[in-house]
Image (spheres, rainbow, N blue to C red):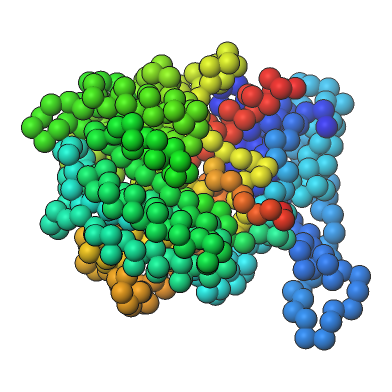
Amino acid sequence: MIHQYRNNGYNIVMDVNSGAVHVVDDVVYDAVALLAAEMPETEKKIGKEAETAGRTPEPGEQVPESDAAGLTRIPAELRTRVEKQLAEKYGCSAQDIADAMSDIQELIDAEQLFTKDIYHDYVIDFKKRKTVVKALCLHIAHDCNLACRYCFAEEGEYHGRRALMSFEVGKKALDFLIANSGNRKHLEVDFFGGEPLMNWDVVKRLVEYGRSQEAEHDKQFRFTLTTNGVLLNDEIMEFCNREMSNVVLSLDGRKEVNDRMRPFRKGAGSYDIIVPKFQKFAESRGQMNYYVRGTFTRYNLDFASDVLHFADLGFKQMSVEPVVASPDEPYAIRKEDLPQILAEYDRLAVEYIKRKKEGRGFNFFHFMIDLNQGPCVAKRLSGCGSGTEYLAVTPWGDLYPCHQFVGQEQFLLGNVDEGITNTELRDEFKLVNVYAKDKCRDCFARFYCSGGCAANAWNYDGSITGAYEIGCEMQKKRIECAIMIKAALAEDEA
Amino acid sequence: MKKVKTLSGNTLKESMKKGGCGECQTSCQSACKTSCTVGNQSCENANR
């Protein structure tokens, strides 16, 4: 599958199945488009097949049927036709066209163009594996000192009652994680809410407890904290800098944007109180291992200005994400908002490059992409792991597939005493992957977003294997921008 | 190649050989909490 697009003056060709990404000139760009409709996708031997090539397989060894097709050539008739079309369109020299076709053949030979999707069977095998739990989102406080208007947690209460997690429940959650994590060494625990600083003493005791278990079980905890910052103080910052591998700091951007959606319960804005604390916190962490994280809504479709506002405040790590909301909310993002939102990502991308080149760059979470050392295909196919590798724990110890499902009783998986009792639901989540989603199968972004958020799919499509199409459009644009940024920065390095 | 600059080769297929160790970060824990994005995660497989 080929996906090609032009952005900010760059011609990008993505060979989706191999993960290859190319920046090409106009002639190659058009040649690929003309060929793509008719070229057969190719597959060469890989992995086990390649290992067994040229020798007799061991008795009982499973060797897939090998395809002896070898290198694929562009069919002569197709090649002639495409060359003719290019000559007519560009009036360029025969040599120019020959160079373009030669480059394309080289990419085909290197398995970087017109490759086949060979992962389908692999994901089935992958999903047969016993999954382990590797991350917990601890709802340490179902209570909040802000009253954010879009809060999916209903001001921290998650359709339930206000509650704080006791140390005992948290301890059982950590024990559950250790016991169910198999051979995985790194265990992730996010202190989430509501607002976790409203139960700070328990956070500290749980970190201490977790650390006390590491040597005995050969595990390493990575604690993280998601906070609105209201209660941040020096002692908390100092503790977090010692113990938390990442902190997520909630702030929406410009003062008027933030204060409209993130007021205190009595209505006053939170920006003035929080910003200086976050600035100090980010600085004290060496501008690393944190994210200032905002939510944008229909009220600030010019959200690039909020991202840039963060940068202007001195932050270096940031994320601004679309609101998750019921479509009937006035602030919910609508389909007709998409053109503006997509243009906004483009605007942000151009400024992002400019600032990087000027030496005052920053990281925007959704523009970060590692094309060469990124996640393996197994990870890309299996997605976020909600309901299997990742679970949310309520203050009273109930387990849910993730924080977004907390409080929806049909998604209750079990509890920290008995573990996962609703294995049927767990297995449903186990099967969530890009091949289980009809809308992902033909999408160029499937190996980058991994099928998206199950909770979004549930909210908008009524099925965890559905898709939230507005979210998909934004995701695709962000990936296109991220790759274009790589192209622009690579050009600078050359 | 005269007309092509490759930013990334066939990394996905390569990653099948040694992938799947599961040590990588859970996507939602990293920053977003509302939108799964896997492509920007780092691989933590020391043997890759």
Most foreground residue, B17 or A362:
A362
In the image, taking residue A371 as reference, residue A104 lies left or right, namely right
**Which residue does the image show at 17% across and 56% down from the upper left?**
A163
Question: Can residue A437 be spotted in the picture?
Answer: no
In the image, taking residue A255 as reference, residue A175 lies left or right, namely right
Could you say where residue A76 lies in the image, as x and y percent from the top left? 83, 46
Most foreground residue, A371 or A280:
A280
Q: The C terminus of chain A lies in which quarter of the figure?
A: top right
**Which residue does the image show at 40% across and 40% down from the upper left?**
A240
Could you say where residue B35 lies in the image, as x and y percent from the top left? 39, 46
Total numbered labels: 0
**Which residue does the image show at 39% across and 29% down from the upper left?**
A281
As drawn, A412 above or below A284: below
Extreme residue in the right direction: A54
**Which residue does the image show at 17% across and 52% down from the upper left?**
A157
Question: Can residue A368 be spotted in the picture?
Answer: yes
Could you say where residue B47 lies in the image, as x and y percent from the top left? 72, 56
